[in-house]
Structures are given as structure tokens and as C-alpha cells.
Amino acid sequence: MWTVLGIAATITAVAGLVWFKPWALWVDETVDEALPTAGTTATAPAEPPVAGTSPSASSTPTEPAGPVTLAQGTFISHEHSTAGTAKVVRLADGSHTLRLEGLDTSNGPDLRVWLSDAPVKEGRAGWGVFDDGRYVNLAKLKGNKGDQNYPLPEDVDWSALPSVSIWCDRFDVSFGAAALARV
């Protein structure tokens, strides 16, 4: 009988360790990605001429402007201490990326980067709101520290999803979040 209980306790302990991954809290994964750049062969569409004027040199196609920050926000802590900045950046080719700069949070099991329509709330009230409405799971978090980029799908209207959450999908809780405000 004691052997069966010992085996059951061992199986339970191993399953618990695999599920919770407590060692992840002490292991940092640092990412240092540069802001992506688009190819320089694309050209911006020409501005249509204003009625009654002649075309000018400024209406000819030109090289697109470099990356432009459209919205940004500062992370607040939820379940775990979280700091850094989230930015929506339009790249020269017109695509958009979510950039996390100076991210500093705990590591954990199954962390994701989400855009959500839920408001960012301080304290425990904000821990679990991001899956209550519309959200987009952009990707698995690349690392719990550093600078990283997440391309935004073309069919996602990021302006309708003004919150970024570092979401623990295993426990349905936000480690930290940032409210995006247009700049």
C-alpha cells in the first residue's frame, strides 16, 4: 500500500512540476531585436494633384519614410512586476509591428503577447480582464526581458485593440499590460 501511495505521490509531484514550471520564475530569457526595416525598393504612392494646380516635384513617388511610432504605452504590473514600453510602429513598407522595448517581467509558463479591447486596470482588477472581450494572440513571448518585435497581421485593426498584455495562457492571468495611446 505504501508503495502505491509513494508512486502516486511521485507522479503527482512530477506532473505538478511539469504543469507549473516553477524554475521559469528564476530563469531569464533576454531578447535584443532591432526594429525591423522594410525593403527600400517600395515607393510611396504619389499625392494626387490639387485641382487648379500643376504637378510639382513633391507629387512624384519618393522613398517611404522610416519607421513611425503610431501609438505607445507603458507597462503596469499585474500578477508579476512588469516594466517597459509597448509601441505600434508603421514600417516603411506600410506594415505594422508591435514593439516591446525594455521589457522586464518574470518568466513563466506559456506567456503570450495579446492585443485586447479590454481597458488596462491597475491591481488585481486588471489581472483577468483581457480575455473577456475581443483579443488577438500575436505570439508566444520571445523573452521576458529586452526588446522584441511582433508583426501585426494585416487583417487586425490594432486601433480597435488598444491594450497589450503579457498573458499567461496556462493560468489565464496578465503578468502586466500597457494601454496604447496615439502619439
Image (cartoon, rainbow, N blue to C red):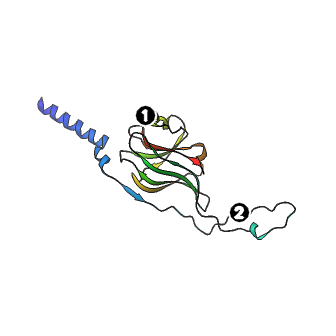
Residue 151 pos. (x, y %) = 52, 54
Instruction: Tell me the kind of residue under disc 2.
Output: Pro
- Residue 157 visible to an observer of this rendering: no
Q: What percent of the width, then of the height, locates residue 25? A: 31, 46
Residue located at (44% from left, 43% from top): 176
User: What residue is shown at x 24% (from left), y 40% (from top)?
Assistant: 14
Q: Which mark is residue 45?
A: 2
Q: Secondary structure at mark 2?
A: loop
Q: Residues within 10 Å of mark 2 (few under 14, many from 20)?
A: few
**Front label number (2 vs 1):** 1
Which element type, helix, strand or loop, lies under badge 1? helix
Which quadrant, please, contains the N terminus?
top left
Instruction: Give the image location of residue 85, x and y in percent.
Output: 49, 51
The foreground one among 31 and 135 is 31
Residue type at mark 1: give it: Arg
Q: Is residue 99 visible?
A: yes
Mark 2 and mark 1: span between their CA atoms? 47 Å
Give the residue furthest to the top. Answer: 1
Which residue is the extreme one toward the left?
A: 2
Location of residue 101 with respect to 77 vertically, above or below? below
Picture residue at 12% right of the left edge, 33% below the top: 3
Any mark on residue 124, and which? 1
